[in-house]
Image (tube, helix red, strand yellow):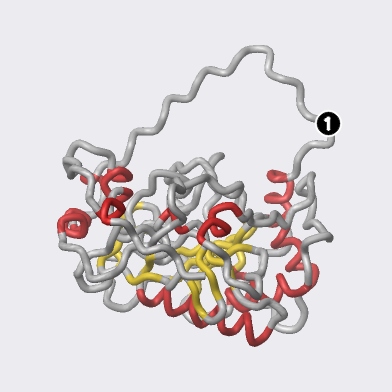
Amino acid sequence: MPLPAPKPNDLAKPPPLKLDKAPAKQLFGAEKLPNKLKSRSIGFYAKGCLAGAKPLAIDGPAWQVMRLSRNRNWGHPVLISTLEKLAAKVKAETKWPGLLVGDISQPRGGPMLTGHASHQVGLDADVWLNPMPKRTFTAREREDTSAVSMANAKFSGVNPKVWTPEHLKVIRLAATMPGVERVLVNPVIKKQLCTDAVGDRSWLAKVRPYWGHDYHMHIRIGCPSGSDSCKAQAAIPGDEECGAPLDAWLKKVRKPDVPPPPPKDKPKPTPPPKPIMLSDLPGECRTVLEAPDADFAPTVAAPGVKPAADPDDQAATPDPTGQDTPVPPTPQ
């Protein structure tokens, strides 16, 4: 079913925000299209922007993009190519018809209004852990369909009613794609992968346990060639890390059998973090915002749809790992 053509009002730009007054997330969140600059990732995964972004088509031979209202199907061309090739491999080598792709980046990257601290430089992508159906979702279904958690109720392991051997195959394919440096999943998923993986297990080193990520896997590639201003993340340890480090994570995420009693004293409210301003980002990000729009059609959602939160979204607090951090981070 073809998506509706955009109405003229849908493409009208709101009054421009003052670059040095508004938080960076408002500036970048207001951009509907990428710019005409040469494609390059600028800054770090959790503090940067994206020039010359390219879109992942909302429908492909082996993928469908979800949550079109978020307008986050943009990325560096190397990441977009990686996702297209991964989807083709998944369709050819597993029982899945293809992938459901969630957030990548905004048209010009940068901080987001909701849901992420990273995804700012076009090198991160969320891929849902439920397979693409054999039919094409409507625009409305792309907003209303929920991803599926792989964890059981206590977060002591995966849910055997939804976890299958195909999940291991899909995550292994993602981790072994050229250029992929990390695949973030919930610790209970990493535990199951460590249990089930046979043969060459070297790919497990790239699969990193982290908070959330029970509904989707988070794929991250390294800084592409030509992105001289891109800041690389520290290299991962070389071993599979299925022992003590993973056990520590499992203790953190497991829910207690008996809920703890409420605190006697009402906790003091935590002041909101200081917003990231344009001046906090690399200087090139000003040019990224000011450059003219590229010649792309905007991503169009179902009429009247407003962006909604997903169950796997986290409170976005920037940290050294470049991930959503609802609690103090552990470097990944």
* Residue 8 x/y as whole percent: 26, 56
Which residue is pictured at 49% across the width and 52% down the height? Answer: 323
Which residue is pictured at 52% across the width and 70% down the height? Answer: 1
Quarter of the figure with residue 121: bottom left
Quarter of the figure with residue 279: top left
Foreground: 209 or 57? Answer: 57
Q: Residues within 10 Å of mark 1 (few under 14, many from 20)?
A: few
How many circles with numbers are drawn on the protein? 1
Q: On the rendered image, what quadrant is the C terminus found in? A: bottom right
Tell whether 250 sits left or right of 51: right
Q: Which residue is mark 1?
A: 258
* Residue 159 x/y as whole percent: 80, 56
Toward the top, the furthest residue is: 265
Q: Is residue 95 above or below residue 107?
A: below
Can the viewer see residue 244?
Answer: no
Tell whether 261 sits left or right of 315: right
Query: Residue flagged by tag 1: what amino acid is it?
Result: Val
